[in-house]
Image (cartoon, rainbow, N blue to C red):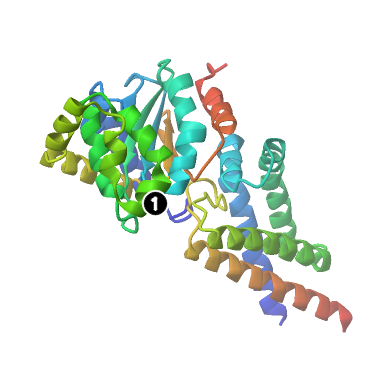
Amino acid sequence: MNRMQLPSLALMSILVVLTAAPPAAAQSSSSRAIGPVTAAVRIDLFSDFQCPACKALHEQTVKRIKEEYARKGRVRLVHHDFPLPQHSFARQAATLAAAADRLGKFDAVSDALFLQQDTWSKSGNVGAVVDSVLSPEERTKLRALAKDPAITAGIERDVELGRRSQVSSTPTMIITHNGSPSPIVGVVTYSVVSRYLESLLRPAK
Amino acid sequence: MKALQLVLRILLGAVFIYAAYSKLRQSWLLFALSIDSYQFLPEWAVYAVARTLPWLELTIGVLLVAGVWLRYLSVVVTTILGVFFTVLLVQYFRGASIDCGCFGVGEALSAKTLTRDALLLSAGLVLTTLAWRRRAV
């Protein structure tokens, strides 16, 4: 869907969804949502752990945005799962990452999943990759947490939010400033994103 | 033939003006992000294209609607559309997940995008043929 075809009502509904009713994860101290709720800029990242472009964006750009902007409180960065149907193990990976988030291990698990994407995408052994960054106790807890229907429901909420926000491809970052959402599709370099963010964060003259 | 030429000229002119408008109404850095997603230009070129392309599109669109220098303009338009289509086609078959950037940000490259660009390129080719044929008579 392009801007020519995007009705303004749809944009308004995206805005309402993103600002008025943030997902549960966005309101907690979860690593899936970093940065103050009151930040002037909000980045909603729709990502699929099995998508190669998502891996590239995560490693080249998102990690730096997290460190340089979100952790410093300059923007709010929210991760949303958007597992694509053609990726057989993406949903399982999203489930385990969401469960790991409850143990405070989302960053470690998502880093490992992207780093070893080539391996588990072929073998399907997602659990082994996740286990590699957890202690034996955490592994046991994670297996129990992963069965919680709330985890699956959370992923479904993310997917639904993505659909309502016209997300059709991963990765997609929706950068919202002054209530105006701008979707960015694909892999973009950190320096270009950073320049754009700085332009948004610069005080108005 | 004259009517067809008029229709194609106005159609392509309107598309170029709209494409320019959709980019110029937002921050040029957003268009830079779309170009950057193609991952084939160095950063300085990304910024240069993001700054200049919308104005070039606007100029071409206005000249098309005005109907001036049509012979040469139709060649320029067809060449630009040909370059756009080739780049999109290559990226599509590479399986790249990119932002088309055709009419502002947020449109993922898809078969629909390619079809639309192929139709515009065809219109450009017909317009060029008509423009040169008319002059040759």
Residue A3: give x, y in percent of width and height.
47, 50
Res. A181 image quadrant: top left
Depth check: B98 or A133 in front?
A133
Quarter location, residue B123: bottom right
Q: Is residue B134 visible?
A: yes
Q: Secondary structure at mark 1?
A: loop
Residue A91 rendering spot, x and y as whole percentages:
26, 48
In the picture as drawn, the residue positioned furthest to the right comes out as: B136
* B39 relative position to A79: left or right: right
Which residue is rendered at x = 57% and y = 53% of the image? B102
Task: Name the residue nearer the viewer: A72 or A92.
Answer: A92
**Camera-nearest residue between A69 and A106:** A106
Residue B130 placement, left or right of A177: right
Instruction: Tell me which residue sits at (52%, 62%) in the image.
Output: B113
Q: Type of residue at label 1?
A: Pro
- The residue wearing badge 1 is A7
